[in-house]
Image: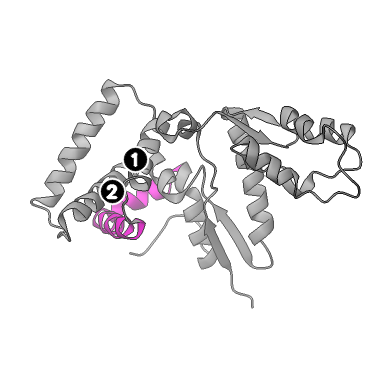
Amino acid sequence: MNIPVAVITDLDVRPIEYYNDQANEVTTKVYCINDSNIEELQNQFPDISFDAIKDEVFKSKSSFEEALQTIKLTKRAPIGFKNYCVEKSQCEINMEFIESIRLKNREAKQRRFVQDKVEAFISSKWTLEYDIALSDLRDYIFKSIWASRIEKNSGEIEFNEEVFSEQLESELHERKKYWEENEHTPKEIAYEIYMSLLKGGLSKAINAQYLANLLYRNKERVREILERDEYLKYLVDAIHYVTNTTGTLGGE
């Protein structure tokens, strides 16, 4: 089959803001066997291969120890094997660590999906919604999430320019004021927006419907953003790939 196929998928690597958020009750210490420590582990245990769990990130000591038990051994593990691995595999979550995981995840997804006429187009940082919140389409996804929240609390609502749009503009204005007063960075804002969807018990499907409505109503502005925004480039690249086109986005 000589038809180009674009697989659009999430990178699925949480940003540093997730680990700095006390509400998530997570530690900034994780366990990972990667390029920074695998050579030392391999030298200590030359008969053991760690490839099966290399680059996986484990949030707790117990989950890492369970993973160690899945490694196929040619003979009984030496005394102190588990404790040594735990000690040497502790990693502090920082931007450098996150970027290294992003790179590994991207490479792994490319290997998984790319073949023949199939190409993978992977979100820039975390998920589609998070990347939209990082982009210049931020205002639209903020409004769509608020619309989803209103529907959840009040039942189905109608999209109208008089009451509904005015309410969304008011909510956006107040939140922008808050962000500015508290000197929130674009990444902190994107994280807040996405988590309001993720933890708010809202339907991603319903949010997508409201977002599509907003984007269509502002399609000329949206097209201009899509063609230049670095966080959304992978979506545009996917469209160009399957349509065998280049340059600006056309049509409706």
Residue underneath mark 1: 193
As for residue 219 lying within the magenta part, the answer is: yes
Q: Are marks 2 and 1 in contact (CB under 8 Å)?
A: yes
Residue name at image x 34 percent, y 40 percent: 193
Region in magenta: 204-229
Which of the two residues, 4 or 209, is positioned nearer the viewer here? 209
**Along the horizontal axis of the image, is 168 left or right of 122?**
left
Residue name at image x 37 percent, y 41 percent: 195
Residue 39 is situated, as x and y percent measured from the top left of the image, at 83, 33
Residue 94's place in the image compared with 153, above or below, is: above
Q: Residues within 10 Å of mark 2 (few under 14, many from 20)?
A: many
Residue 239 is situated, as x and y percent measured from the top left of the image, at 48, 61
Residue 44's place in the image compared with 235, above or below, is: above
In this view, the residue farthest toward the left is: 162
Q: Real-space Cα distance between discs 2 and 1? A: 8 Å
Amino acid at dot 1 = Ile
- Quarter of the view holding residue 101: top right
Identify the disc placed on residue 145.
Answer: 2
Residue name at image x 40 percent, y 46 percent: 132
Number of dots carrying numbers: 2
Residue 224's place in the image compared with 46, above or below, is: below
In this view, the residue farthest toward the bottom is: 1
